[in-house]
Image: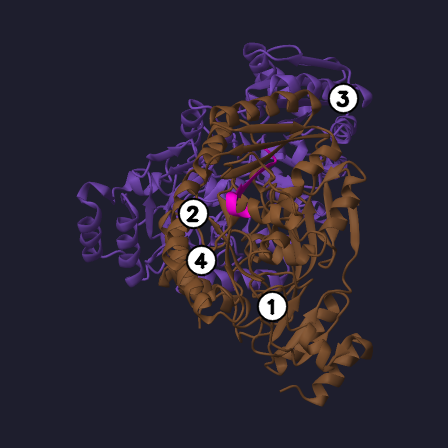
Chain colours: A brown, B purple
Amino acid sequence: MITSTLLSDLEAVVGRDYVRTADDARETYGADALKRGHPADAVVLPDGAEEVAAVVRLCAAARLPIVPRGAGTGYTGGAVPVRGGIVISLERMNRILEIDEDNLVAVVEPNVITGDLQAAVERVGLFYPPDPASLKQSVIGGNVAECAGGPRAFKYGTTKQYVLGLQAVLPTGEIVETGGKVVKNVVGYDLTHLLVGSEGTLAIITRIILRLVPKPPVQSTLRATFRSVPAAVQAVANVIRERVVPAAVELIDGDSLEAVARYLNVRSLAPEGTGALLLLEVDGLAQAIGEEASRVERACRTAGATEVLRSNDEASRQELWRVRRELSHSLRTITPLKYNHDVVVPKGRIPQLFELVEQLKARFGLRIPCFGHAGDGNIHVNIMVMPGNDDEIRRAHEAERLLFEGVVALEGSISGEHGIGFAKAPFLPIELSPDEIALMKRVKRAFDPDGILNPGKIFPE
Amino acid sequence: MITSTLLSDLEAVVGRDYVRTADDARETYGADALKRGHPADAVVLPDGAEEVAAVVRLCAAARLPIVPRGAGTGYTGGAVPVRGGIVISLERMNRILEIDEDNLVAVVEPNVITGDLQAAVERVGLFYPPDPASLKQSVIGGNVAECAGGPRAFKYGTTKQYVLGLQAVLPTGEIVETGGKVVKNVVGYDLTHLLVGSEGTLAIITRIILRLVPKPPVQSTLRATFRSVPAAVQAVANVIRERVVPAAVELIDGDSLEAVARYLNVRSLAPEGTGALLLLEVDGLAQAIGEEASRVERACRTAGATEVLRSNDEASRQELWRVRRELSHSLRTITPLKYNHDVVVPKGRIPQLFELVEQLKARFGLRIPCFGHAGDGNIHVNIMVMPGNDDEIRRAHEAERLLFEGVVALEGSISGEHGIGFAKAPFLPIELSPDEIALMKRVKRAFDPDGILNPGKIFPE
């Protein structure tokens, strides 16, 4: 339990306005996009690494759990204080500290909204590629903690490829800096990339140095429809054989398309009999993308595309992307609740993944629309359930375990973007061996000997 | 000391032919490109992870140091058994196991020569970009252990960006697998990238899964000469402002150019008064690179280039690259020994780095030719010394400490490519704080509680 002495010590560090113990704050900061929260004992809003470190030292002395929080947009409960304790919200640390055009580097505090950073660097002709769907809400610190991906990952990589250095507060209270402003750095262990994707269990990130690239001047978008998912995947294979690397290769299955049509109240979004739709985008110099778009179109037609639309101007490009943007809302026309799993398989094995999903649909009588990043093999498998239908929920949980086992059997991974948090922790042993989990736990202890930082995450109980 | 029982146990694991205790083997396998070796007690050549693990368990039980070894081309003594013990040479594990064109993935054993892998994937239109200067001798496992870079890193990144997964043997004898064949994987901690660059101190890498990209169909090479290093660096800044990302941006200073001219026995390689030369390369689709090369040329001319040569065909491109390729040999025309430091600074600060080098030359009366990867700010600073000239060697060591301190003051790093090994271990505290070093040592213990794997490396005594 939190004592009044500790509370007044915390207030002395961050100011009275920035320690919150009211019930609504404890509830609000106890939940994230997973919608399975647990109230915090208190919420603290420090500003700057020194304040974070002072808060951490107070909590460490009291052996109280601490949970760092960005925007709370995570899907696996990474920011949920499942064992209570202090939520350290980084929301006041939201400044873009530097955009260094000469060195192609940005330095930011953790709670800069990803879309805001993108807009800021694009104004000077630069580009920060990672584009999680949540980019208008989620923040860079959370993106780093979870190693966020997005459609552009096939060409540009995920958040990991853009983090050059970090400042972070250890659960033992020290402030450390990892990496730096240089792309090449091989001095000691690469703690930067160990912290990326560590889900707030190793350190609290207080400053981030990001690599930027020049903004590609022109985009061209293509929308291709196919009778089946295997035909669409063949098109992706053809694109790769054409040696083109699109900036996006999004796959949407027939069930998902139907949901979007229902949501938009239109009869259909694609030719009759469409079982899969691909959205592809190439970007770069105008001189190159005409050729690249033509190769992509050829790749789709060779795979039997029933229709290929192509657009270079912004308005009609956005129209082509609309079906993808409306997807998440549209699934609610099926049921209000989805178990949204971000599994990933080697891209050539996407057809086998869809075969597995068909089997699960048939065996468990479930609706499972799928869409995702076909270039990476990262497919969002949405198991739709009606809240209160306990039998359906039970069947959904049976199906999700078989899904994870099947994905690992295909040499894939149970999470490509969302992380493990506490929601997926029970499934970790499906993918990792006992020796691998034991090693990760030893790494955790090297950072957090008392286990106070974000306990109950990643590892099964 | 190694016992005859242990030797026969090792022979039982790998076969008698693959345990070597002759003096010449112990010496040969005790040295690397640093040329400051220490003999091994014995050399073992296992084949496969199971044999490696069995060897490790035998050595662990005897508390005997073990040192993994690839091709022995490292510059900082990473493969040198400074405390004796068993060198585990991975030379028999040299197979390319798979080139998966559909998934853009290669699976290799550690001792595949980097250049051989590149040739193999290029035959099917794919590309493995990392290109350390040693690529005809060095092996992928060593490249991974050191996180090798090379000229293409500015556009394509270093080895780190291409490693998707590893199989490795822990110093406690377990075989673990990290990452996998998928680009997106956020399940547990990113041990893959912790092992990359860990210099064989955390685990012995026995299999590597690499990401490939399509081979760029066309290259265009430009050679531009400048009166001074700052003018050349201004050209690099201009290139970035033109929003072009060249595949290579190599900078060679006047002293280095003179050495090459002397070596090739020509009067001059560049217009009179040349203080710096840039080699730039753009690659991609033919439609784009004409435009990109023109932008690069404009960027150079705006910065005051005295001459710009440009070539698209293979033979004349190779002729432009010749000066770069002959550099290492050519420096021997100055003195037979060089302290070759791979420092790195934010690229906009390269002029300050060269100012520092000028000060060191003047103050210590040393010859210090420099060249390197200007796009990354990664400059090879070669302090030339005459073996046996103890006073010069003493001055060189004073200069190198000031060089490292200056580089860190410029927000750079003391090593961008070669790692720390034992040669640079005393300088680690210049760049890392005591808290950061202590954290890295705790990570080391999480992998290697008894400290038997490659002891004496990275950390100062």
Of residues A359 and B266, the one drawn nearer to the viewer in this rendering: A359
Q: Name above or below for residue A73 compared with residue B13.
A: below
- Give the residue type at disc 4: Leu
Residues under labels 3 and 4: Cα distance?
A: 62 Å
Question: At 25% across and 43% down in the image, what residue appears?
Answer: B20
- Tell me, yes or no, if residue A50 can be seen here: yes
The mark lying in front, picked from 3 and 4, is 4
Please give the label number shown on residue A35.
Answer: 1
Find residue B205 and report its horizontal and vertical position in percent.
39, 47
The mark lying in front, picked from 4 and 2, is 4
Find residue A109 and report its horizontal and vertical position in percent.
74, 57
A348 relative to A148 in the view: left or right: left
Q: Name above or below for residue A222 compared with residue A191.
A: above
Write down the residue under mark 3. B300
Write down the residue under mark 4. A366
Total label count?
4
| Secondary structure at numbered mark 1 | loop
Q: How crowded is mark 3: few (under 14 residues within 10 Å), some or many (20 or more)?
A: many
Please give the label number shown on residue B180.
Answer: 2
Residues under labels 4 and 1: Cα distance?
A: 22 Å
Quadrant of res B100: top left
A223 relative to A427 in the view: left or right: right
Work out which quarter of the rendered image holds the C terminus of chain A and state it: bottom left
- Give the residue type at disc 1: Lys
Q: Are marks 4 and 2 on the same chain?
A: no
Work out which quarter of the rendered image holds the N terminus of chain A and state it: bottom right
The magenta region covers A246-256
Residues under labels 1 and 2: Cα distance?
A: 31 Å
Residues under labels 3 and 2: Cα distance?
A: 43 Å
Q: Are marks 3 and 1 on the same chain?
A: no
The mark lying in front, picked from 3 and 1, is 1
